[in-house]
Structures are given as structure tokens and as C-alpha cells.
Image (cartoon, coloured by chain):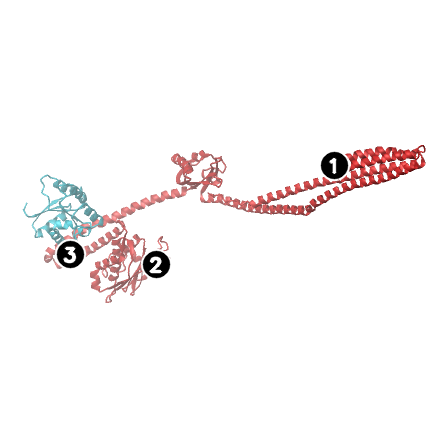
Chain colours: A red, B cyan
């Protein structure tokens, strides 16, 4: 059940953040590696230069020794010998340092070894030069040889040193080249990555502010709707409560408290709170329906009473529903309506209704009894008169005969009145059995009933085809008899009566007088005659009981016929109207529901 | 009691009606023996005597004190010995309800009391000449009410 609208927090936001974080992690790891490489390289440079320095030192120590020796040989001054004497130590120190520096490089070690041998040879040649230059052991040829050999050795040493320097330089160069290659991609790559990360973060920022904007809108809507809800509850006299079945927390709307006769927030509701307000008569029923609602998920309307703290009784109508949201948590939603006013009104209405029913029944039975019981004495009067006129008329005076015949006429009229009244009351009281009937047949029956008068007046009756409808057949037949009979009765003297019956199907929207009806489709049947008509101002009153437009001496009648017509049409949830122009004929229009 | 004469019984509480009835029968040519019960109670007491002679036709008013015509009709139709009596309802009322009820309960014909003595004579003539076996087998709601 998706009863809680989903707030669309964008998933893309999360994706953007994750990507940005990964880029930044990558960038920092790259930077770290670069840093380490740089460090390594600078160490390597230092290393190379150190070797270079130590080699130079070595070289200069040997040169110092050479210079000192030469000075001594030329001058025979002992002072020139001191650099020569120190040079050995210097050579040794540098040599140890070099050995350490080249410990990781076997090729350089080998070179160093070779250098060492050359240096040793050089020092041996120094010793020999000194020996053959001493005046005691002076030997010019040997001295020259050793001096010359020393010169060659010196060149070899220099060559060796240069070679070692070259190797270090080459190594350094290759390392630097490799490093350069590695970091040559670096700046562009890392700047673009950084920019990417930045743009991702900016994107995320935009998304966040968008979401916040949406949240604000939602929030405002929520505030408005909850405010409106509270107002509507007050105005509409209803209240709501929610019972979260997970947390077992019950929330009452403000109006719920008011409905119970308390102020909002007067107490913290628990399951049993509500039952305390329910009238003892209804407590059991309400407790049961609260249990049922969890089981059945919905609650049909229940009607009950509550007692407020001030002992006032209110009538409540309640319903509820179990709601399950996406996460499967269940919330019971209840709605209560305060129907006290309606209830009291309803009671009044019921009382009035039963009163009305009673008086209606009384009226009907009065009507029936009156007309029924009136028949009895009337019938006897008529029977006695019929006997008098048979046996004794010959013996009576003329005025006596006249009186008797007047009594006879009056009694006959009374009979007609009573019969009509009876028929009128019967259209109301007898069972209303609706049967699908062919109105054409009922119409033919009506004509048969009126054969005598139709023949007498030589009337022309035409009709279009009538429908088949669910009607009370004898009543519709009576209706046709009364309407045709009416037209025949009020036909113009010396004019052939013409009555046209026409039928068509219509929609209630076309006729304002039918708009109140629940039914929309009707058959419209018109009875148009060429009779004497009537003043249109009476078009409403002619349907009222006992209303007559002519004196009874001209046109005998009871004023009940059209009232019966109206009653019959009412019984069929139809409508009857009359219209006429004096001396032009009249139109009676029936609307019968399809 | 004369032999061959039709034995007619009328249950009616109205003295005038009994008088009209008696007079009308006297003017009818058919030989009849007419007797009266003054109300429903008396009628049933009379019929329930063990050695009673059952009428050929029973005319039954509906609106009677103590016991109404409809109650009498129901009792007669439930009594094995009486249930074959020909019953003509003879009432002022011509309400659909009364006609329907008595038809369903098994009356043979429904007569609305006429308001002309001559009509009464015609009705009696009509009733007396009905072949009841034939009439009963062809009885339906339409011919149940006697029309002149």
C-alpha cells in the first residue's frame, strides 16, 4: 500500500559524492607517490654528488701528495713533505666513505677496487721517487722512470675517477629521466582530475540546494495542509486518530480531544483511553470493533454514544482503516464524526414521520370507511326508491312523484361521488404491483370501456405507437379512460370530437419541470383534443380534488377524475401537465419514466 | 320443507337487506326455500348442528358483527362436511382486496349488493340458473365477480 507519498531524494547525489571521493582518494595517493619519488630522486642526486665529492677529494689528496713531493725533491725542505704525509690519511678517509657509498653497486665496487690498486701503485711510485731523489741514493735514470711511471699512474687514476663519476652520472640521468617521464603526465592529469572532482562536488552542491528547495516546498505544503486539516476537522465536526501498531503510540488530532470534551493535549492517549469515554451501553461493541479492525483491516461505520467529562452525551459515527506503508509498518487510522445534531434531528424526523404515517393511515381508513359505510344507507335509499317507483307511483300526487324522482337523482349523484372517492382512495392504498405492460393494449381496453360514448359522439381517436412500460396496468387503463373521457365530455357541441394521442421519448433535461426527478429518460404522451378547452389560469387547479370548472347541471361530474389521473401518474413517478386555450382545445401531457 | 325447492341460506345482519332478499326471492319463479342467519356466529352454530340440512347456495355478507363473513368462509372451507357448499359472497364492498381474499379462500361467486330492486331480482335469477359444476371448474379471477 503506497499511502505515504514518496519524497524523491535523488540517488544521483549519492553517486556523485562517491565518485568525487574516489577521485580525491586517487589524487592523494598519486600525490603521495610523487612525493616519495621526489624524495628518492633527491637522495639519489645527493648520493651521486657525494661520490663525486669524495672522488674529487681523493684526487686532490693525491695531487697534494704529488705537489708536496715535487716541492721536497726540488727544495729539500722538509716542510713540503707534510701534505704528502697527510695525504695518505685523507685518501684512506675518502676511500672508506666511497666504499660505504657504493656498497649497493657491485660495478662501482670493482672500479673502486681498481682505483685502490692504482692509488697504492702511485704511492709506491712516490716512495721510489723519494728514494732515488735522495742525494745518498740518487739515480737519475730510475728517478726519471718512476716520475714518468707516476705520471702515467696519475693519468690512470684520473681516468678511473672519471669513469666512476660517469657511471654515477649516467645512473642519475637515467633515474631522472624515468622520474621525469613519470611526473610529466602528472600535472595535467592531476589538475584535470581535481577539476573533475570539483565539478562533481559543485554538481552535488547544486543537487543538494535543489533538494532543499523542494523540501522547503513540501514542508510548506505540509504545514498548510495540516493547518487546513485541523481547521476542517473543527468546521466539519470530525476528528482523527492514528495508532502506530509498531511503536504502540496513539496520536489524537486536536479536534479529537475537543470532541471528547477536553482541551488538546490534556492527556496522553493509550489504547484504553478512548473506551473510558464510550457510553456503558456501547463499550463492549466498540472494544470488539477495535479488535476487529486489526483483523479485517477496515471498519464499517459504527454508531455509538460517548459521555464527556461534563456528563454530556454526544452521538458519534466512526470508521477506520489499517494502513500499511512501504516498509510494512502498520498504522491504524480512525475517523470520528460528531453526529449529535443529525442524530437528534433524525429522531425528530422519525417521530414526525411516524406521526405522519399514523395520520395518513387514519385518513386512508377514514376515507375508506366513510365511503364504504356511506354506501350502505345510500344503497338502501336507492333500493327503496326503486321499490316505491315500481309499486306505488300510480297512487302518488304529481308533486310526490316529482320529489321521488329528485331524491332518485340526488341519490344517484351521491353514488357517483362515493364511487369516485373510493376509487381515488384506492389509487393510493391498494398494492402497487408494477408489471411490464403494453400500453397499446391498455389504451385499446380504455377505448372499449368508452365505446358507448365514443359511438354516441362519433369521436375520432388517433394514436401513434405506445411503448411497453413497467406500470400498474389497471391504473394506467383508468388514466387513459379518464383522459379520453374528459376530452369527450368537454367536446364542443356540433363538432366532431378529435383526440390525437402522440408518444415520444425524451430526456428530462429538455423539460424544466422534470429536472428534480432522479430518472432521466421519459416517455412523453400527449392527449390533444379539439374540445372547448379551459382558461389556462386553471391549468394547475384542475388536478386538485373536487375542483370543477363547470356547473354540475351543465356537465355532471365530481371533480375527482383528474385528481385520480394525477395520483396515478404520481404513483408511477411521472408528471402530468395540462394546457389549453379557451375554445381551441386542450393538451394533456404525461411524462412516464422509461 | 318443500321437496325439489332450492334451499337458500342468507347470512346478513341487516334487516332491510334480508327483507329485500326475501321479497326478491318471492318474485322469482323458481321454487325456493329461503332462510336467514342474523350474524356469522349464528350461521356457524346452525351449520354445525349434526342433523342440519345443508343449503344449496349460501349467500354470505362480509361485514357482520361477532363473526365476519371471511371468518365464516374460512371455517366452512376447513370443515370436511361443509366445504362443498356453494358460497356466494353478498357484500356492499367491491374492493379489490375483498374480492381477491374471498376468491383465494374458495368462494364461488362475488355479488356486489345492487342499489336497484330490479337488479337484485336479475342477480338472483342469474345465480339460480348457474350450473355450479360447470361454473366452478371454469372459475377465474375475471368471472368471479358477477356482472349483469
Residue under label 2:
A506
Cβ atoms at labels 1 and 2 below 8 Å apart: no
Screen quadrant of the C terminus of chain A: bottom left
- How many C-alpha atoms fall within 10 Å of the one at disc 3: few (<14), some, or many (≥20)? some
A434 displayed left or right of B72: right
Task: Name the foreground residue: B62 vs A171.
Answer: A171
Instruction: Name above or below for residue A514 compared with residue A215.
Output: below
The earlier-in-sequence mark between 1 and 2 is 1
Instruction: Name above or below for residue A510 compared with residue A267.
Output: below
Disc nearest the viewer among 3 and 2: 2
- The chain under label 1 reads A
B81 displayed left or right of A129: left
Q: Quadrant of residue A27?
A: top right
- The disc placed on residue A404 is 3
Cβ atoms at labels 3 and 1 below 8 Å apart: no
- How many C-alpha atoms fall within 10 Å of the one at disc 2: few (<14), some, or many (≥20)? some
> Is disc 1 placed on a helix, strand or loop?
helix
Residue B99 pos. (x, y %): 20, 49
Residue A358 pos. (x, y %): 29, 45
- The disc placed on residue A106 is 1
Mark 1 vs mark 2: tell me if same chain: yes
> Is disc 3 placed on a helix, strand or loop?
helix
Residue A190 pos. (x, y %): 67, 45
- How many C-alpha atoms fall within 10 Å of the one at disc 1: few (<14), some, or many (≥20)? few
Instruction: Name above or below for residue A431 compared with residue A287.
Output: below
The earlier-in-sequence mark between 3 and 1 is 1
Residue at the farthest bottom position: A494
Amino acid at each position: 500500500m503506497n499511502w505515504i507519498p514518496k519524497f524523491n531524494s535523488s540517488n544521483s547525489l549519492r553517486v556523485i559524492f562517491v565518485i568525487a571521493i574516489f577521485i580525491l582518494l586517487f589524487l592523494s595517493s598519486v600525490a603521495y607517490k610523487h612525493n616519495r619519488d621526489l624524495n628518492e630522486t633527491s637522495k639519489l642526486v645527493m648520493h651521486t654528488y657525494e661520490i663525486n665529492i669524495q672522488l674529487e677529494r681523493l684526487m686532490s689528496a693525491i695531487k697534494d701528495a704529488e705537489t708536496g713531493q715535487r716541492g721536497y725533491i726540488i727544495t729539500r725542505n722538509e716542510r713540503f713533505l707534510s701534505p704528502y704525509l697527510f695525504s695518505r690519511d685523507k685518501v684512506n678517509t675518502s676511500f672508506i666513505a666511497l666504499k660505504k657509498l657504493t656498497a649497493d653497486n657491485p660495478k662501482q665496487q670493482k672500479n673502486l677496487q681498481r682505483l685502490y690498486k692504482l692509488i697504492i701503485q702511485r704511492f709506491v711510485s712516490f716512495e721510489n721517487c723519494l728514494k732515488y731523489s735522495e742525494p745518498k741514493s740518487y739515480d737519475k735514470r730510475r728517478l726519471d722512470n718512476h716520475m714518468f711511471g707516476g705520471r702515467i699512474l696519475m693519468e690512470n687514476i684520473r681516468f678511473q675517477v672519471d669513469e666512476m663519476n660517469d657511471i654515477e652520472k649516467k645512473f642519475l640521468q637515467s633515474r631522472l629521466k624515468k622520474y621525469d617521464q613519470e611526473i610529466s603526465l602528472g600535472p595535467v592529469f592531476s589538475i584535470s582530475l581535481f577539476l573533475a572532482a570539483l565539478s562533481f562536488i559543485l554538481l552535488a552542491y547544486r543537487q543538494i540546494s535543489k533538494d532543499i528547495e523542494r523540501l522547503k516546498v513540501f514542508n510548506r505544503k505540509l504545514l498548510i495542509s495540516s493547518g487546513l486539516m485541523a481547521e476542517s476537522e473543527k468546521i466539519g465536526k470530525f476528528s482523527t486518530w492514528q495508532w502506530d501498531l509498531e511503536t504502540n503510540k496513539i496520536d489524537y488530532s486536536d479536534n479529537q480531544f475537543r470532541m471528547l470534551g477536553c482541551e488538546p493535549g490534556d492527556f496522553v492517549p493509550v489504547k484504553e483511553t478512548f473506551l473510558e469515554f464510550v457510553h456503558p451501553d456501547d463499550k463492549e461493541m466498540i472494544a470488539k470493533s477495535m479488535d476487529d479492525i486489526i483483523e479485517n483491516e477496515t471498519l464499517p461505520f459504527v454508531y455509538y454514544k460517548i459521555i464527556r467529562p461534563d456528563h454530556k452525551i454526544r452521538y458519534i459515527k466512526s470508521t477506520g482503516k489499517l494502513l500499511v506503508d512501504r516498509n510494512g509498518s502498520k498504522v491504524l487510522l480512525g475517523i470520528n464524526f460528531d453526529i449529535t445534531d443529525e442524530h437528534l434531528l433524525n429522531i425528530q424526523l422519525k417521530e414526525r414521520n411516524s406521526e405522519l404515517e399514523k395520520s395518513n393511515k387514519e385518513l386512508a381508513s377514514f376515507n375508506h370507511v366513510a365511503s364504504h359505510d356511506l354506501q350502505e344507507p345510500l344503497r338502501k335509499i336507492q333500493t327503496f326508491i326503486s321499490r316505491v317507483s315500481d309499486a306505488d307511483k300510480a297512487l302518488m300526487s304529481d308533486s310526490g312523484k316529482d320529489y321521488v324522482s329528485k331524491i332518485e337523482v340526488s341519490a344517484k349523484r351521491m353514488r357517483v361521488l362515493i364511487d369516485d372517492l373510493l376509487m381515488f382512495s384506492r389509487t393510493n392504498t391498494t398494492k402497487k404491483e408494477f408489471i411490464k405492460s403494453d400500453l397499446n393494449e391498455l389504451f385499446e381496453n380504455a377505448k372499449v370501456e368508452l365505446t358507448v360514448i365514443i359511438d354516441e359522439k362519433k369521436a375520432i381517436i388517433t394514436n401513434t405507437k405506445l411503448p411497453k412500460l413497467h406500470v400498474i396496468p389497471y391504473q394506467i387503463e383508468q388514466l387513459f379512460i379518464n383522459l379520453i373521457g374528459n376530452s369527450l365530455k368537454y367536446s364542443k357541441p356540433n363538432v366532431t370530437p378529435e383526440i390525437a394521442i402522440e408518444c415520444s421519448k425524451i430526456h428530462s433535461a429538455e423539460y424544466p419541470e422534470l429536472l428534480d426527478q432522479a430518472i432521466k429518460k421519459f416517455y412523453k404522451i400527449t392527449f390533444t383534443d379539439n374540445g372547448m378547452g379551459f382558461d389556462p389560469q386553471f391549468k394547475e387547479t384542475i388536478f386538485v380534488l373536487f375542483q370543477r370548472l363547470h356547473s354540475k347541471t351543465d356537465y355532471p361530474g365530481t371533480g375527482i377524475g383528474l385528481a385520480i389521473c394525477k395520483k396515478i401518474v404520481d404513483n408511477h413517478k411521472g408528471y402530468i401537465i395540462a394546457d389549453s386555450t379557451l375554445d381551441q382545445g386542450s393538451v394533456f401531457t404525461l411524462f412516464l419514466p422509461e | 320443507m318443500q321437496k325439489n325447492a332450492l334451499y337458500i341460506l342468507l347470512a346478513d345482519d341487516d334487516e332491510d337487506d334480508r327483507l329485500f332478499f326475501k321479497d326478491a326471492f318471492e318474485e322469482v319463479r323458481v321454487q325456493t326455500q329461503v332462510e336467514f342467519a342474523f350474524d356469522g356466529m349464528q350461521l356457524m352454530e346452525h351449520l354445525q348442528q349434526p342433523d342440519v340440512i345443508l343449503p344449496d347456495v349460501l349467500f354470505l355478507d362480509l361485514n357482520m358483527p361477532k363473526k365476519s363473513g371471511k371468518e365464516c368462509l374460512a371455517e366452512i372451507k376447513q370443515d370436511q362436511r361443509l366445504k362443498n357448499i356453494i358460497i356466494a359472497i353478498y357484500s356492499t364492498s367491491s374492493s379489490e382486496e375483498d374480492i381477491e381474499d374471498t376468491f383465494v379462500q374458495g368462494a364461488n361467486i362475488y355479488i356486489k349488493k345492487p342499489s336497484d330492486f330490479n337488479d337484485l331480482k336479475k342477480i338472483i335469477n342469474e345465480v339460480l340458473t348457474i350450473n355450479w359444476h360447470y361454473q366452478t371448474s371454469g372459475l377465474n379471477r375475471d368471472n368471479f365477480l358477477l356482472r349483469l
